[in-house]
Amino acid sequence: MNRSLNEIEAHAKRAARGAGLAWGLAEEAARAARWLAAHGFGGPALLADVLAQNDGVSHAQVAPVSLDGVWHAPAQELCPLAAGAALNDCADRLAEGQPVQMAEVSYPLLVVPFAAWAAIHLNAPVQVRWQNLLIDTDGERVWLDDQQHEIETSKANELVCVTAKRRKDAAAVPGLRGDVPPQVWDKLDRFAQRTFAPATEASRLLGAGTGASDND
Amino acid sequence: MRPKANTSQTIAKRDPALVMRLSRLGAFHQSRLSFMRILTRRMIRENWTFSRPVFEFDANGVGHAVYCAHTPDRTYSLIAFGHDLPPEERSDRVIAMRWDSTFTLFDGVPEPSDLERLRRNVPLQEAGRVSEKELSVSRANRSVRLWDHVVSCLAEGMQPDPAEIAKVGYLMRTTAVYGSGKLGAADREMIADRPECAAPFQIEMLSVFLTRTYVRDLVQHIADLKGGDAAVRLDAGIARSLGIGNSTGLGMAPFLINHPKLLNNWISAREEAIAIVRSVPAATEAEVETFRRLLIRAVYSADLWHSEHPIQVEKLNRLREDLSVVTTHVAEAAICGPHPWDRLHAWAENTLGEDAQECLASLMLEPYGRLVDHLTDQMSDTDRNAFRIDGTMRVADLRAVLERVYGWALEIDWSDRSQCARAWYVSQEKLEPRLGERFEEPIAAYEQPLAPGRDAATLYAALKQEDGDGHLAAFLLAHPEHRHSVRRAQIVDRAPYAEIRDNTIGSDLVPIDMLRCKLSFFGATQFDPRSDRWVRICMFGNAPYPEELQDDPDHDWSYPPLADGVK
């Protein structure tokens, strides 16, 4: 269904929180889903998948063990949201010519929005590579080279993020709406529902405020 | 060319530690920078024209209408649907399912196919779906008492009783005006580059402005059908005094916390305006006269302001007493000499309660549109990347920021149950924010991040365990639970009015203080709490109707004309 980007972000934030992400990470996961949806990618679907994969798993088990060397999780696959957030946090490393390398990353496309925000911060394009795929972005525009259709893969064995050269050839620009298939929306909704307190008559009255009549 | 106001500015903006307390935010008054006034100034300046291509209603008010606002570049259309609502279903609460009238603001002029599509969706409100051609969705209910009075009077050939009109102030009240992508409507980003949409909430304000005209027309139409030849036209002066009511609940309170940069930009613009006027070296006679004239009307406005809520009754009594002190002071101490407004401001700070201080601060801006109106340009939030965390910041530096900006929160004993007695949560049934009792209801597990003070104190305690030379990126990798607080602290470090510097979960929290702050920026008047969690207000009361806009060059309609008709 065609959705406003605010709807997508709000729904994704609730879902990410419902799946157990910390509030700050849930905010960024939601913005990542929005960014990808605006660019015509299936960001909400990948978000739903990674939330399902890591449901009930602690952050420490899927976050980088250290920000030195190749980033990897303790034993499982690396969560693209945890790794993406860390990538944006230390974007200045890229400017110093240091690539950020990650191993065994789930749903690597979810790292790309974080690289895009790093590019805006650095005011320089950033390239993300995995398998045979290259994606360049200046934060807004996207240049994609994906001969093998690996963009929405569920796992990358290796992912590299580096600053890139400025490009003048035709780029994809973001739109102002996003398409989210109903089954993806529902999948996110199942996580989002966990954030809502069950309604009781007491809370209905207490929580929203009783008081003087509202029909006069 | 814009006047170079700040060349003479020597007086700094007020300290955020003073301004951003809930009691003061809960005492804010509308001003020249309020969003309704930004809109009507633009309509007048750009000579907007208006039309009503469709208006079809039966004697029960069932039907639809289209009201068009034509700017120099484009047209916006309010599409209004009228319904026959059984009295037992009339409720302003968000849990209502049906309303007297429902609306959408359409981008352009709707085709018949658009009207058909919208007729199937807009009456359902949250249960319906709109598209990117629609910019807002809203609904309104009649004030039954006043509606029936006005219809029967007009139908019988009489004008309604002005005392009855003054008691309520509006014929319909909106209960929600959804914009910015809600229910599938266009995101703000789709229209933000249009000049008429640059200031905050202009689409929502336009929707309400046109709704007020629709309500006036509809009440007349129904009275005409009822009274036939006996019916008379509603007196233009009475019509002018009528605004649109609005019932607002807790949904509005989290908005201020969830949009820290936007809050900063609103408050900062008003504070800068106050500082500019305080810095004016000398006032002209005309400027002083404008101020005196509007002070009389502000006193009258406070007299008209009704509320039965104990907190508001007390505040109103103090405001009226204080405004009488101001009147005496202004009559005895001439507003002259160097920096007259700064001296008045200093006197007010030492003499008046917060409500009258803020009323006076807004009044002082009135003679100086040429110096302060341009500040409305900076009230939106265009910084898309403010959410990025600077992970290279050292732990010691963030500790210093927290000490400076959240000192008030670090002094609170958060283990004291009264300091964290409340919790904000979202209810399952209508996805609306609510405020509950943490220790009495099972809601803590669903708590929303709307207690920045407590969370900043928790962050500070965690940072004290860390090496001061360490970087935040490493700290956050191990402690993702602090990401939202680190982000806020870095925002508030750059934008000092971004944070409410008060406890938002204490047992003594009065949530309507947050509502009053936001509604004052909308330009609302007659703030009337119905409990500590929901309020009624009036919007566009005394504002010109579309055909009257060009007769109102003073832009001062927010202050009611005196009873004898003197402006």
Image (tube, rainbow, N blue to C red):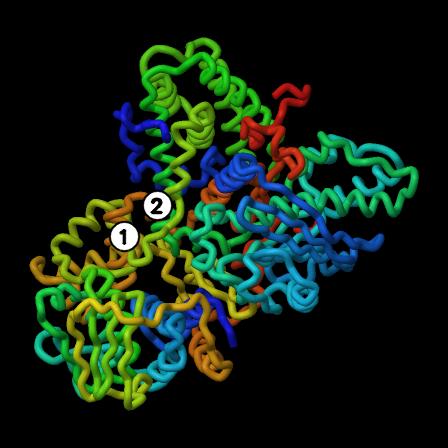
Which residue is drawn at the image coordinates 37% and 30% (left, top)?
A: B1
For disc 2, the marked residue is B264
- Where, quadrant-wise, is the C terminus of chain B in this rendering? top right
- Nearest to N terminus: mark 2 or mark 1: 2
Task: Check disc 1 and report the residue beneath it.
Answer: B491
Q: Is residue A163 or residue A25 the one in the foreground?
A: A163
Residue at 26 percent of width and 76 percent of height? A111
Query: Does the residue at mark 2 contact the one at mark 1 (Cβ under 8 Å)?
Result: yes
Picture residue at 24% right of the left edge, 73% below the top: A136
Check disc 1 and give the amino acid type. Answer: Ile
| Pointer 1 chain | B
State whether residue B530 is above or below residue B465. Answer: above
Instruction: Give the CA distance from mark 2 to mark 1.
Output: 10 Å
Q: Is residue B247 above or below residue B329?
A: below
Q: Quadrant of residue B231?
A: top right
Q: Amino acid at mark 2?
A: Asn
Badge 2 sits on which subunit? B
In the image, residue A27 sits, relative to residue B325, either above or below, namely: below
Residue B396 lies left or right of residue B56; in this view the side is left
Residue B399 as seen in the image, left or right of residue B415: left
